[in-house]
Image (spheres, rainbow, N blue to C red):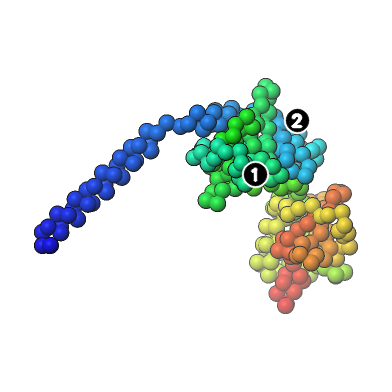
Amino acid sequence: MSTRTLAIVLGSLVALLALYGIVRLVDSRGAPASDGATALADVLAEVDPGGVSSMEITGGAVPITLQRGSTGWTANGFAADTVAVRQLIEALTDVSVGALVSSNPGNHDRLGVAGANARQLQVTGEGGAQVTIAVGRPAPGGGTYVRLPSSDQVFLLSSGLRIAAELGGGLGRWRDRTLAQVDTAQVSRIAIERDGSWTELVRTDGGWTVEGRPTTVLPVRDLLGGLVNLVAMDFAPDSVSLAATRRVVALGAQGDTLAAIEMGGPSDVGRVPARARGVEETFQLTNFDADRVTPTRAAITGSG
């Protein structure tokens, strides 16, 4: 085959491939959504992010009711994690219905939209209108398998968050786990106890000091950053007892307590039991967060 003939053949092949791509693109753009996908999209479109009054999650070990009240959201009567609630509402309102995955009920268990792994989410608006979807497993490539309870069709729901992961946690996932929220500009003193020894930090015009000497900048900066919004990873099981070996107390200029937290030693799985003053529940902090808000004296003074 001559060079000229080969060039003609290759050119024709490229043109055919380009034409095929254009046809596929036009076809995909012009393909109408199925009735099932349209029905699911219509149901989700009814969720008004500003008008949600309650959400019920069933199918787990404990049914969970998220309720909007005059003072904020609650989870089964407890103060709720408002960030988690907001993220769930956003995940339901910023979505797109993707491909039909299956219309065979025999696949429902495998996809998690029926059986022991299924979660059912019912959203109620202020006017009483309700939206209910069955939420299955996270898809390997992203998104979540969902279906309407009245339909066998399972679709891939794309969202900024994996809705299945959001619903998979227990009650602790939805309860407020805040140990401290401090405006650190108002902090004038911090007292830290570790193993019976106290270290007091005092804010001066020249910066933070311990016994009149300047502190190391980074540990104190991390300490203050940790107190801005200290959120536990979970609630401690009833079997966990807290024998305090560490404490941190942040005080304002008038001696008012801005935060007071006591902690025990780390568990075998690297979680530190912690409790805020005035709160009955015992939480679990990560080792990182516990160490961040109770740095050693050596780290603070730079003597280690």
Q: Secondary structure at mark 2?
A: loop
Q: Quadrant of the N terminus?
A: bottom left
Which is nearer the eye, 74 or 293?
Answer: 74
Q: Left of 12 or right of it: where is 291?
A: right
Residue 133 appears anywhere in the view: yes
The residue singled out by tag 1 in the image is 109
Tell me what residue is drawn at x 42 percent, y 31 percent. 32
Q: Amino acid at mark 1?
A: Asp
State the image coordinates of residue 80 (x, y, percent, origin top left): 74, 41
- Which of the two labelled residues, at mark 2 and mark 1, occupies the earlier sequence position? 2
Residue 135 appears anywhere in the view: no
Callout 2 crowding tier (Cα within 10 Å): few <14, some 14–19, many ≥20 = few
Tell me what residue is drawn at x 73 percent, y 54 percent. 233
Q: From mark 2 to mark 1, how far is it between C-alphas?
A: 39 Å
Which is nearer the eye, 57 or 235?
Answer: 57
Total count of labels: 2
Q: Secondary structure at mark 1?
A: helix
The residue singled out by tag 2 in the image is 70
State the image coordinates of residue 267 (x, y, percent, origin top left): 80, 65
Tell me what residue is drawn at x 54 percent, y 49 percent. 142
Question: Which one is closest to the eye, mark 2 or mark 1?
Answer: 1
Q: Quadrant of the C terminus?
A: bottom right
- In the picture, the disc for residue 254 is none
Q: Left of 115 or right of it: where is 100?
A: left
Quadrant location of residue 40?
top right
Quadrant location of residue 215?
bottom right
Quadrant location of residue 191?
bottom right
